[in-house]
Image: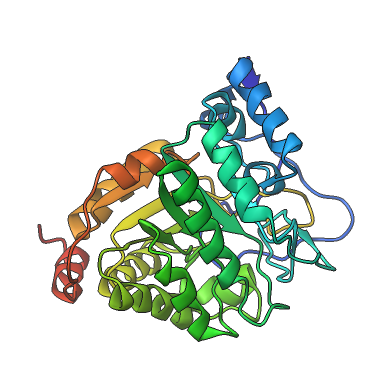
Amino acid sequence: MNLLLPIVERDSAGGCGSPPAPREGSHERQRLPAWLRRPIPIGFGHHATAELISELGLETVCESAKCPNRSECWSQQTATFMVLGDTCTRPCGFCSVKKGRTQEVAADEPQRVAEAAARLSLKHVVITSVTRDDLPDGGARHFHDCVLAVRQRTGATVEVLTPDFIHCPDAVLLVVESAPEVFNHNTETVPRLYRTVRGRKSDYRWTLELLRRVRAMNPAIRTKSGLMLGLGETRDELLDTLCDLLDVGCELLTLGQYLQPTLDHLPVVRYIPPDEFDELGRLAKQLGFKHVASGPFVRSSYHAREMADATSPTPAFPTNSDRCDMAFHGQP
């Protein structure tokens, strides 16, 4: 049985450039390429995970962001917990998470996340959140409490996938003090497209600074970031961005295909073939990333445990400018 993901709008040229704005009225529609159809895993694990999440009143990014891997992950009894509610304060052009009036933060949520992790026998727990610009610390203290609750209850390693905390830059220290094994913050796209894709409140330079600060505060924490491809970025822009990430000590990288959630979201400019994802993954490793997941269905926390287990922390990070310069000039 194949999963036919939603039909999405595509630029007629199918090439690089700035992503066009969603058009009013009629939309040209096109089925996804064959490589974006996949079997749906069916089994007890999927239903058991869904029932547990519902019982404990938790949110998962798997459902809220309409992740194409949710059936696979839930069948394997894994999930990425989304804390701080289900409503975001940022109107990003790519994301299907609800926007609008936020809810009060639930004080017992860290314990409920820890309970779910324990009952699922998770060895690696991923915790993310909506962006909460309405909170004085952006939700950093809540992340801190969730990490400690999960570690105390399960002994599992923990990965956080945080918002940018751009209006409360010192808040990141609260997250770092909880010492998650992996600190993930997504770059999402290249600098030229940053405001179009992420909104006017986001800042590419701050994304890099956030990752740099985490490594400076605690070099034992592995930093990770991810990009969505197919939004109109050029190859050179992508390589420049990867080099920027390496220069701030980012060790782990995910590259995946952007899929338009609805016709109200940014359209896909290009579908990247699997062999091109493979090539980009190999190049990213040659540039210096410790571990890379690159493919059409790769998402930020897809196979996160395998990626976290596949590398070890390094005490410091070098500047990778020379290595990146060689890559641009075709040298090994």
Residue 12 in sight from this viewpoint: no
Look at 22% across and 58% down and name the residue there.
313
Left or right of residue 313: residue 15: right
Q: Which residue is more in the foreground, 127 or 12?
A: 127
Look at 62% across and 19% down and name the residue there.
2
| 78 up-or-down from 58: above or below | above
Look at 75% across and 56% down and name the residue there.
86
| 195 up-or-down from 295: above or below | below
Q: Which residue is more in the foreground, 130 or 329?
A: 130
Question: What is the quadrant of residue 52 in the picture?
Answer: top right
List x then y, in percent, for residue 329: 17, 67
Q: Which residue is more in the foreground, 110 or 189?
A: 110
Left or right of residue 21: residue 19: left
List x then y, in percent, for residue 42: 62, 16
List x then y, in percent, for residue 144: 51, 65
List x then y, in percent, for residue 268: 62, 52
Question: What is the quadrant of residue 23 in the picture?
Answer: bottom right
| 78 up-or-down from 220: above or below | above
User: Considering the image in quadrants, where does the C terminus appear?
Assistant: bottom left
Residue 204 in sight from this viewpoint: yes
Look at 14% across and 74% down and name the residue there.
322
